[in-house]
Image (cartoon, rainbow, N blue to C red):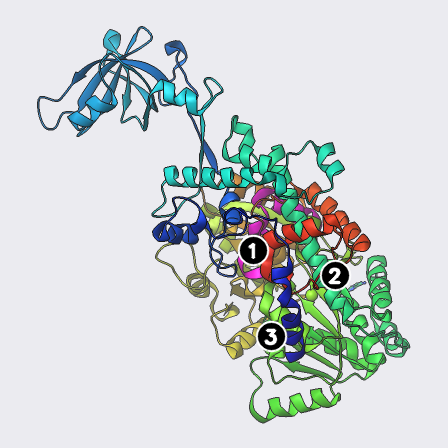
Amino acid sequence: MDVAKDDALSKSVEVADIPCFEITDGPDPLFSAVSTIRGIGPKLAEAFGRLLGNGLRGPARRLDLLLHLPHGLLDHNLNDDPRTLVEGKRVTLDISIVAHRPPYQRRQPYRIDCLLGDEPLQLVFFQGRRNYLQDQLPVGKTRVISGTIGRYGKGKNQIWQVVHPEFVAIPKALSASEPQKGQWLQPVYPSTQGLTQRVLQSRIRTALDDLELHAALLPEWQDPSWIERQGWPSLTEALRQIHTPTQSDDILPTSKARARLAYDELLASQLTLSLTRRKTQERDGKARKGDGRLRRQVIDGLPFTLTAAQEQAIVEINQDLAKPAKMLRLLQGDVGSGKTVVAALAMLQVIEAGSQAALMAPTDVLVRQHGNALYELLRPAGVTVALLTGRESGTSRRDLLMRLASGEIQAIIGTHALFQDDVAFCELGLAVIDEQHRFGVDQRIALAEKSPHSDVLVMTATPIPRTLVLSFYGDVELSEIRQKPIGRKSIATRAAPKSKLDQVIEAVGRAIEEGDQIYWICPLVSPSDELNLTSAEERHESLKAAFGAKVGLVHGQMASTEKDAAMQAFSSGETRLLVATTVIEVGVDVANATAIVIEHAERFGLAQLHQLRGRVGRGDKPSSCLLLYAEPLSQLARQRLDVLRKSEDGFFLAEEDLRLRGPGEVLGTKQSGIPSFRLADLVEHAGLLATARDDARLVLARDPELKSPRGQALRLLLRWHDEATVASYLRSG
Ligand code: ADP
Ligand code: MG
């Protein structure tokens, strides 16, 4: 661990060396703090810090402000023709003021009679201040106002009315500020307390002006011919277009300006990933060929033949392990596609070569499951296997750690207990990480530091769409098992509203009478005041009332031993109906379970539903899945349930999930450490991501230290993207 820290330190000196463009007159227009912008004092700087701040990055920089993009537009385009007005619409009108009518009584509004062309129109202010209004809207003058238009009065006396116009301006001032006649679009920004739209707009404009002043000094970091082919603007122009839109398309992700900024961000992240990867590869890995002795024994003992997809994945991993470079490979395969045996064979290969192998799973339940499965697989080869979770303690733990450090234990399966400081391997050759996206970034780093020479195989049963794989791992190698073992029955999936609950319970009763085993999933552990959802505890109570001791309960808040007991009772058949939360989502394997009821299916994501459904259909009996939903169903939820009923292909469902929900939701960005992009939209800009990856590869192949003119410019881009990360990976130029 210390070695790695020193490493990072020795390389972090170069932050200062990443060049910036030469500014002599004033602050750096990209990287200096927002407090250097005219009109931003300490108090505003603090508010901007809150809005833009990223704890890791330090105070908000000008760049952060410039990249704070509008999420909407106020359309102040003049709409002068009374015949085209529609009640309830926001409009901007050129009006002339005819008369002020202050209220006779306190409760009445202040009215101002105006003309819109020849049509009467009334402005209405509740508690309007007379002096102020007479000043803003003087009789006999014309003004531009905007607000929501309505009709007032009855029959023939109906007139147009705007209550509390949100915006009043002198027509001349308007046209002076915006040369295109009749075009006046105002960007609207995400904001925070203490920052008005007006302040945001004006400070962003100032930052833009400052940047434009120095635009000639800012080098283009993209390949000029690529930029030209795409018809993209320069960075400065792109920012200008987005912050001073002239048409509504300008702020959409599809605009050329947005695409350019997105590409900048994607390229920066791909370069960072490649640099990171290069660094880990430089720490030389070890070639671990193995002699095939243990693997042959295990394969010969399998009760089935490997599928072609499994064979293929095994060959790919085998070749990686046999090379001296460090392996980072992602093994994706649907639930039940048979990843465990593939992982076991990889582990055996490094064990044959005299190293140790570890498999990490996110939960105790899974560790036990994997433990059993792997134990069964590895036993014929006589491999020494151990388990390590948070439960091991005292002498048994100490003893285990000693055997691990001496190399006696050849394979270990554990939770993040494996990351703890006092866990030391004799020589860890391969780390297999199951369901990786449930591990945080720190844990991944801790693992990398524990095993500087070990190869890494990441397995996921929730296939991640390729675009996300690229954005997360960059240049990772990918193995996919898209084929299911022969003989797998498909799972009949149906959806029903909760109003059919009684019938469902009756059917469940019949099924368990006939010897079936059923999961019943609820979204919450215990009842919640805020959410009107059935909790696992409540459902357990009501089902127990109906079926007695045959009903079990397992959820994440139970003690480990209770969880184990509940799972054990279900897999031995002692309980027939297991009420559970999503703790059973991953990996749990009870071959006799043939049905799953998912209550409040509308609350779950597509990938998660697919995972849950994968708990059944593991044996040879036909299986079913019932999606029980509460009405009314949102459009999105309905689509999800439809897609799920129609497909059992996890890869297809993952792409659909990404399309329906967006990348942040798909993997739960926050905790997963998946980079969340500020500018790029992984659905809209998916194509650009692949280009960025190729671009990054090419750049680093030609100019590994980023010393060429473009390389120097790219350092600037990297600095924009993430100073902290980049600093530790670049050598001094
Ligand atoms: P997952 O990819 O979800 O981890 P597992 O590795 O747990 O899948 O495999 C699910 C089940 O399929 C296990 O019981 C395993 O023994 C079995 N299995 C794996 N490969 C094959 C195969 N080629 N043919 C038949 N059954 C297989
Ligand atoms: Mg598995």
Quadrant of the displayed image that contains ligand 1: bottom right
Q: Identify which amino acid the numbered label 3 is placed on.
A: His
What residue is at 56 percent from the left and 55 percent from the top? 669
Q: Identify which amino acid the numbered label 1 is placed on.
A: Thr
| Residue hosting label 1 | 669
What residue is at 78 percent from the left and 78 percent from the top? 378
Q: Quadrant of the N terminus?
A: bottom right
Q: Which residues are magenta?
A: 649-676
Instruction: Identify the mark nearer the N-term, 3 or 1.
Output: 3
Instruction: Find the distance from the CA under tag 3 to the CA under tag 1.
Output: 20 Å
| Residue hosting label 3 | 416
Q: Nearer the viewer, mark 3 or mark 1?
A: 1
Q: Could you say which quadrant of the image residue 403 lies in?
A: bottom right
Instruction: Identify the mark nearer the N-term, 1 or 2.
Output: 2
Q: Identify which amino acid the numbered label 2 is placed on.
A: Leu
Examine the rendered structure and indicate whether residue 725 appears above or below residue 659.
below
Instruction: Find the distance from the CA under tag 1 to the CA under tag 2.
Output: 20 Å
Q: Tag 1: Cα neighbours inside 10 Å, few (<14), some, or many (≥20)?
A: some
The answer to whether residue 732 is seen in the rendering is: yes
Q: Residue furthest front?
A: 24
Observer-nearest residue: 15 or 289? 15
The reply to whether the C-beta atoms of the residues labelled 1 and 2 are less than 8 Å apart is: no
| Residue hosting label 2 | 331
